[in-house]
Amino acid sequence: MKYKRILLKLSGEALMGGQKYGIDPAQLEQYAQEIRKVKDEGLEVAIVIGGGNIFRGVQSSTIGIDRVQGDYMGMLATVINAMALQSALEAHGMFTRLMSGIKMEQVCEPFIRRRAIRHLEKGRIVIFGAGIGNPYFTTDSTASLRAIEIEADVVLKGTRVDGVYSADPEKDPNATRYAQISFQEVYEKGLNVMDMTAFTLCQENNLPIIVFDMNKPGNLINVVKGEEVGTLIN
């Protein structure tokens, strides 16, 4: 394996599968199977999952909810997704811990950096829910920050597209995919990879990012083996 400790970032929208909202059990099952393959190879795995399939805080103003309140609602949505993923992983025999940026002791542990690292060292999958516990920060920023805190080797951003393109591939048929690109080139070309806070955190801490299609079976294990899957940003 090319990496020892990874942080996997999943979008909440990806959990919808073919549905318009909510959680698709088939999609959840596929993710659990893919993560199991990686775990069986002895990797230490941490996960951050979004909540956009349930509620997106930045859109809350359109229905009369202020931004801060909406962001907290979005954080709670990530905890729902994290609990669903936790159950799916444990159904496949994996040991997990759910840690939250907001205290809710009945369902998860509060985030403590040293405890999270210890869980990983003991072979448990650590899922980070509720973002970093503050409004105005996305789950991309959470993924970058937590990856740095736990000293992960790489951030794996699992999406529904197979990498970073020169333009939106769904709108521009001439868009080309990058196999590898530097942080500086992403800035200069104005490519949309992560929000700027998350992206800058990774750049300043020399933490590589790999953007890949999580929905294609076998992609996750191929990424951690070091195969050319998706786009590597370093």
Image: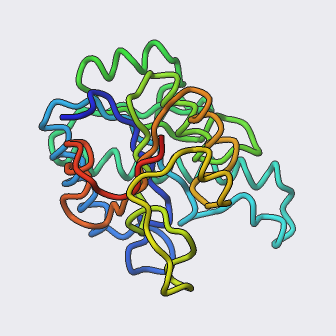
Q: Position of residue 6 (x, y in %)?
A: 35, 34
Residue drawn at x 56%, y 26% is: 205
- Image spot of residue 51 (x, y percent): 55, 57
Residue at position x 55%, y 85% in the image? 172
Q: Position of residue 167 (x, y in %)?
A: 57, 73
Side (left or right) of 186 relative to 122 = right
Q: Work out whether residue 130 or residue 225 is closer to the camera in this orientation and state it.
A: 225
Residue 158 picture location, percent across and down: 40, 56
What colour scheme was applied to this rendering of the protein? rainbow
Q: Which quarter of the rendered picture does the N terminus lie within? A: top left
Query: Quick one: 143 or 195, which is closer to the camera?
Result: 195
Nearest to the observer: residue 55 or residue 41? 41
Note whether 211 is above or below 108 in the view shown.
below
Say whether residue 156 is left or right of residue 203.
left
Which residue: 22% across, 53% down? 34
Residue 115 against residue 19 in the figure, above or below: above
In the rendered image, the vertical position of residue 98 relative to residue 225, given as above or below? above
Task: Indicate left or right for 195 with 221 as reference.
Answer: right
Decide: is 188 above or below 142.
Answer: below
Tell me how many marks there are: 0
